[in-house]
Image (cartoon, rainbow, N blue to C red):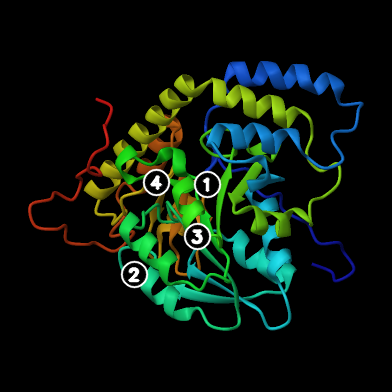
Amino acid sequence: MNSSEPAVTQPIPTPRFDLTLSENPFPPLPSVLAVVNEAIRGANRYPEFLPRRLPAVIAAHLGVDADQVVVGAGATGVVLQIMRAVSGSGRRMVLATPTFDGYPIMAAIAGLQVVGVPLDSSGRQRLTAMARAVDERTALVAICRPHNPTGTVAPAAELKAFLFGVPRHVPVILDEAYVEFLADAETVDPCELVARYPNLLVLRTFSKAYGLAGLRIGYAFGAPELIARVRRLQLPFGMPDYAVAAVRACYAASAELAERIADITAERELLRTALRHKGLAVPCSRGNFLYLPGPAAHATLTGAGIAAKGYPDGSARIAVGDPRADAAVLHAFDGRADPVPRRRPPPGQAAGDRCAGLPVRA
């Protein structure tokens, strides 16, 4: 090609399935969509200067006071407010690696240095090692439960021991973005923890189980004094009025939500079982996603036209719940020679066994 000729830019092919962001495969619940459509009719009016109604609605649902809740543009918006509230010269944030990739990005924006603690070989957060990483420079710690991207769950006893050992002046984010996908026996009482640990901030979102990722509604709750520090950085006019209507409708549709969660988790277990039968060492996940470890996992999916969240070692995370996409994932690994490392299952457990305690659709 002559150097004076313009380069021809090849269009980026659109993936057949985009499983990158662990989105809910279903549209919003009809009852939620109806109230949002009605509320949007008032979009010519400004929302509250600072949100008061939405924190009150969430607080009433949780059983806490309204001054214990801060809201923002998704969980990420709340996290950035938290980081800016605690940041300072030379201050650090302790987290597991890999984790939600928004944490290091937002830490850089807020001026926090990241101290990463690698996961163990099973994809679990090493809470004891994370506690040891906390020092006088630590401004913030984040724990995901379930963990993103592996879907593993820190045992309640380990979590409580960790919180007990962290100095009370160091805020801790308990990221429960996927808490709705936990089995009842795996949940912890967040209100009890918040009452006991004034440095704890429980983070939640309406983006995942509720399927409202595009509306950007997230919140954190904790002790009033800590929440007040975060609220000082609240963006004026930053929370639209339709968020109040959407959240109320979500809480009123708990039965329909439970059905959707059951569908997603059942599909997840079917896919995980099938992938493990193919020799993929997929950890037991409690989110709406699966983690595929190994140097060729991401490349294999990309080659099949499936967009997935990739990691430096070649591993991938995929959203689950859409049977068509799940079938495409399985097809992508057909005939591949050891696309991810094989792992010998524990004695008495077949490679394809489902996660204990979860129903699998027949």
Residue beneath disc 2: 120
Among the two numbered marks 2 and 1 on one chain, the one whose residue lies closer to the N terminus = 2
Residue 332 badge = 4
Classify residue 225 by image quadrant: bottom right
Q: CA distance from mark 1 to mark 4?
A: 29 Å
Identify the residue under disc 1: 177
Q: Residue at x 19, y 44 (%)?
A: 353
Question: For the residue carrying disc 1, how many other residues have a C-alpha within 10 Å: few (<14), some (14-19), or many (20+)?
Answer: many
Q: Position of residue 227 (x, y in %)?
A: 67, 54
- Residue occupied by mark 3: 197
Q: Are marks 2 and 4 in contact (CB under 8 Å)?
A: no
> Split into 4 quadrants, where in the image is the N terminus?
bottom right
Q: CA distance from mark 2 to mark 4?
A: 28 Å
Q: Is residue 344 left or right of residue 100?
A: left
| Distance from Cα at disc 2 to Cα at disc 1 | 21 Å
Label 1 vs label 4, nearer the camera: 1
Q: What amino acid type should be assigned to the residue bearing mark 4?
A: Ala
The first of marks 3 and 1 along the sequence is 1
Mark nearer the N terminus (2 vs 4): 2
Q: Residue at x 29, y 50 (%)?
A: 335
Amino acid type at image mark 3: Tyr
Distance of label 3 from label 4 (alpha carbons): 46 Å
- Quick check: 32 left or right of 120? right
Closest to the camera, between mark 2 and mark 1, is 1
Q: Quadrant of the C terminus?
A: top left
Q: Is residue 242 left or right of residue 47?
A: left
Answer yes or no: is residue 256 visible: yes
Can you give x and y, in whole percent of width and height, for residue 33 in the image? 66, 20
- Spot the residue most to the left: 348
Mark nearer the viewer, 3 or 1: 3
